[in-house]
Image (spheres, rainbow, N blue to C red):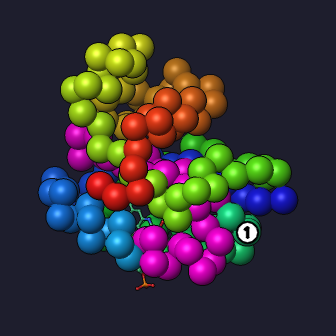
């Protein structure tokens, strides 16, 4: 069994593409040998991340992520055991939410406008999994 977590958080400053590239380069380098995979979303100064792998690796990584001063207000939406990975092909996939996502997924437009904040997510009984899956289709291995 593998452990899968989904959390949301708020960036402590507006991330540029270069900031995101730097974050992802480190995350991917560290995740690969640990068997960690997942998807990171960035929308309006907020993050949503799904991280999955062996429980000990997920917990150790989440402890580090929790101490990272680049974001705050970490809110764990899901922690569950799964048999199969959601994003096996990505040591950390990435998608920056843009206007085209609002057009393609109008039901989520309010979430995209406010970013991933607790009040905008209470409607999601699955903790954001369907949203991650929908955006994964446009995600890339590189930002
Ligand atoms: C939103 C966000 C997501 C992150 N995701 C990961 C990740 O998936 N894997 C990872 O190793 N580090 C991730 N980091 C970075 C860690 O917080 C940390 O800076 C990095 O792992 C290097 O830590 P170390 O030098 O102490 O090993 C993330 C940071 C932020 C702000």
* Residue depicted at 49% across the width and 79% down the height: 30
Compared to residue 7, the image places residue 103 above or below, namely above
- Count of numbered badges drawn on the protein: 1
- Ligand 1 sits in which quadrant? bottom left
Left-right relation of 98 to 120: left
Magenta highlight range:
27-52
Q: For residue 64: magenta?
A: no
- Percent coordinates x, y for residue 105 in the rendering: 39, 18
Left-right relation of 99 to 49: left
**The N terminus sits in image quarter:** bottom right
Name the quadrant containing residue 77.
Answer: top right
Q: Is residue 110 visible?
A: no
Compared to residue 123, the image places residue 76 above or below, namely below
Left-right relation of 26 to 92: left
- Percent coordinates x, y for residue 11 in the rendering: 27, 55
Left-right relation of 120 to 56: left
Q: Is residue 107 visible?
A: yes
Q: For residue 50: magenta?
A: yes
**The C terminus sits in image quarter:** bottom left
- Percent coordinates x, y for residue 14 in the rendering: 16, 53
* Residue depicted at 77% across the width and 60% down the height: 2
* Residue depicted at 41% across the width and 28% down the height: 119
Q: Which residue is mark 1?
A: 54
Task: Answer few, some or many: residues within 10 Å of disc 1's Cα (few below 14, many 20 plus, some between 14 and 19).
Answer: some
């Amino acid at each position: 069994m593998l452990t899968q977590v989904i959390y949301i958080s708020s960036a402590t400053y507006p991330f540029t593409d270069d900031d995101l590239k730097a974050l992802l380069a480190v995350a991917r380098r560290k995740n690969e040998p640990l068997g960690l995979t997942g998807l990171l979303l960035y929308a309006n100064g907020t993050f949503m991340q799904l991280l999955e792998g062996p429980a000990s690796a997920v917990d150790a990584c989440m402890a580090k992520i929790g101490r990272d001063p680049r974001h705050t207000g970490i809110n764990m939406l899901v922690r569950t055991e799964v048999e199969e990975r959601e994003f096996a092909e990505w040591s950390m996939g990435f998608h920056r939410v843009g206007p085209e996502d609002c057009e393609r997924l109008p039901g989520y437009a309010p979430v995209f406008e406010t970013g991933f904040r607790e009040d905008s997510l209470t409607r999601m009984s699955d903790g954001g999994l369907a949203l991650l899956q929908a955006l994964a289709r446009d995600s890339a291995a590189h930002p």
